[in-house]
Image (spheres, rainbow, N blue to C red):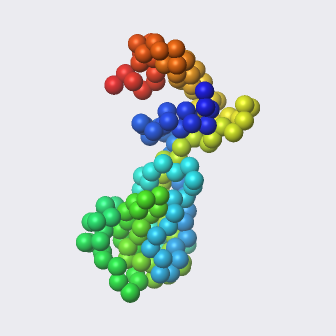
Amino acid sequence: MDQQRHPKSFCTRHNWDAMEATYSINTVSGQELYPFPSPQTKDVKQLALRLDSSSLYMPMREDSEDQLDWNIPVTSVGGIPKGWCRAGAGIRIRPVPSSSNFRLRARVWDYPTPLTDPSATNYWTLQHDDLIEDMATALGFRWLGDFERYNALLPGRDE
């Protein structure tokens, strides 16, 4: 089994609690596009803005990229960001920040840490080794051409 690929593909269909992570991102005055906070980020759950270190985070409105263009078009005048959207593997915020003192809190779903060698571990190998074994066994049945057993054993196929 390709250990780096399969725990990730196991998490493609679902957002598990263990995949949730929170990151802080400093804004840059005049910059509207920010990369996802981690190379492992699957998707963004919520984006919130804090104006300075003494203020609270306030969730921002999420739009599609087209809707963001309609609601908050790009202008040469920056301001306090109010909305956001996904833009490829990044986050677009509008209005474009007028200050580098703002801070974003990104709540995301991250894929599991890649298993890079036989002794590597991550949440799935430590907490749900039974699911990993079931998936490996199912893939073995698929390799042998036994699709009935493959479908019966593959985790997440009981929908």
Residue at 38% in and 87% down: 77
Q: Residue furthest bottom?
A: 77
Report the residue at 74% width, 32% height from top: 119
Check the picture and name the quadrant holding the C terminus.
top left
Residue 18 image offset from top left, x and y in percent? 53, 39
Quadrant where the N terminus is found in the figure? top right
Q: Position of residue 86 (x, y in %)?
A: 40, 60
Q: How many marks?
A: 0
Identify the residue at image location x=61%, y=31%: 2
Q: Nearer the viewer, residue 31 or 80?
A: 31
User: In the rendered view, does 127 fall on the left or right side of 88?
Assistant: right
Residue 99 visible: yes
Q: Is residue 55 visible?
A: no
Q: Is residue 94 above or below residue 142?
A: below
Q: Position of residue 41 (x, y in %)?
A: 52, 51
In the picture, residue 88 is in which quadrant? bottom left
Instruction: Name the quadrant containing residue 62.
Output: bottom left
**Residue 5, percent from left and from top:** 57, 36
Q: Is residue 156 above or below residue 63?
A: above
From what the image shows, is residue 152 above or below residue 14? above
> Of residues 140 and 21, which is closer to you in this image?
140
Seen at 39% across and 24% down, the residue is 157
